[in-house]
Amino acid sequence: MQPVILATTSRSLLFQAMTEEILENDGVLCRPSRSCVLCGQEGETAYGGLRDRLFAAPGVWSIRWCGGCRLAWLDPRPLAGEVSKLYREYYTHSQEGTNPHWVRDLKQFLKKATLRVWLGYSDSEPDLLQWLVGAALGMVPAVRDIVELSVMCLPGSSRGRLLDVGCGSGLFLSAMRQLGWEVWGLEPDPAAAEVVRRRGFPVVQAAVEEAELPAEGFDAVTMNHVIEHVIDPVAALVRCAQATRPGGSVVLTTPNWDSLLHQRFKASWRGLEPPRHLWIFTPASLAACAERAGLAVKLVRTSARSASWIWQESRQIARDGCAPGGSPSEATVLERLRGAWLQFKEDVARHVAQVGEEIVLVATKP
């Protein structure tokens, strides 16, 4: 009998799983991952001898690169049952920040004003002050970018049932419920999923490729910095497409291999995050994965919203070899100003070339 190849599994990954040996990498069982998931060609080693610079997960890792498909990936790749060993100190169940109330209130006012005017998140007419503030802020590209991504580029007119894949502690679910969405979460980390349940949100605890989700049950599916963590990105996107109604949206964000700061910091770039980032995409390779999953790509762009802290962390990794806890050391006022200036420059540059720190992809289900 011939083996059955599931439509939700990339052929190259299945071939590797059947033919390549299992090896132990400092206590983590892995398979060699030499071939590109999109074309099957053997990739070149871009970086080698990498260790976790954030949470001291075990193992020594390489990053391979396919110049034809413009896709990078972790080599070796952990087995699915071993992935949890890489997240023992991770921050998936963090809570809100500790900003003073007046800072949070001001940010909320500015965000709501911009969302009302530019993305239609309003059930009533805004007052004149709110309209003027929102209109003015939305005309600043960097501000509008940040506000759009706070709702994963979903307009108010599309409100319905939302699934957030890799929902962490549920902060995004809480924000979107307040804006009128019916929200669900999907989270493989048991501790994070428990936090979401305590917050009162329905959550499916599973990896996205294995999750039991209602077919065509959601108007929108979001994956905010999740696709780089999954074992098989095409299979994950197929599952998202199956869960989305026809005409619904699938929205992704992920680190950008082509970013200015990766070009600057190379192996010390924060966006690599070995060994948790199994894939590093370019805009072209992310779009190719989405199209292979049967989605219609409507928009691929980049964002500079994270450039300041990515610069701080990458600089610390380059200097000290690590950024413990996944955050930079306390920055001076001068360093903060320098980071803001770099973010401004990257935001300008992203309008000329796809060099922002994050890729933003918006697709629909045909």
Image (spheres, rainbow, N blue to C red):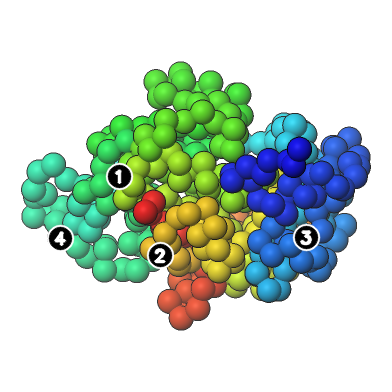
Q: Nearer the viewer, mark 3 or mark 4?
A: 3
Secondary structure of the residue carrying numbered label 2? strand
Rounded to the nearest whole Å, what is the CA distance between mark 2 and mark 4?
28 Å
Q: In screen coordinates, is 210 left or right of 153?
A: right
Q: Quadrant of the N terminus?
A: top right
Q: Nearer the viewer, mark 2 or mark 4?
A: 2
User: What's the residue at 42%, 30% (across, down)?
Assistant: 214
| Amino acid at dot 2 | Leu
Horizontal and vertical percent position of residue 253: 50, 54
- Which comes sooner in the sequence, label 2 or label 4? 4
Q: Can you say whether 102 is above or below 227 in the image?
A: above
Find residue 35 and name its label.
3
The residue to which callout 4 is attached is: 132
Rounded to the nearest whole Å, what is the CA distance between mark 3 and mark 4?
53 Å
- Which comes sooner in the sequence, label 1 or label 2? 1
- Does the CB distance between marks 2 and 4 fall below 8 Å? no
Horizontal and vertical percent position of residue 85: 76, 33
Q: Nearer the viewer, mark 3 or mark 2?
A: 3
- Which comes sooner in the sequence, label 3 or label 4? 3
- Does the CB distance between marks 3 and 1 fall below 8 Å? no
The residue to which callout 2 is attached is: 299
Which residue is nearer to you in this view: 295 or 280?
295
Q: Nearer the viewer, mark 1 or mark 2?
A: 2
Rounded to the nearest whole Å, what is the CA distance between mark 3 and mark 2?
28 Å
Secondary structure of the residue carrying numbered label 1? helix
Horizontal and vertical percent position of residue 326: 66, 46
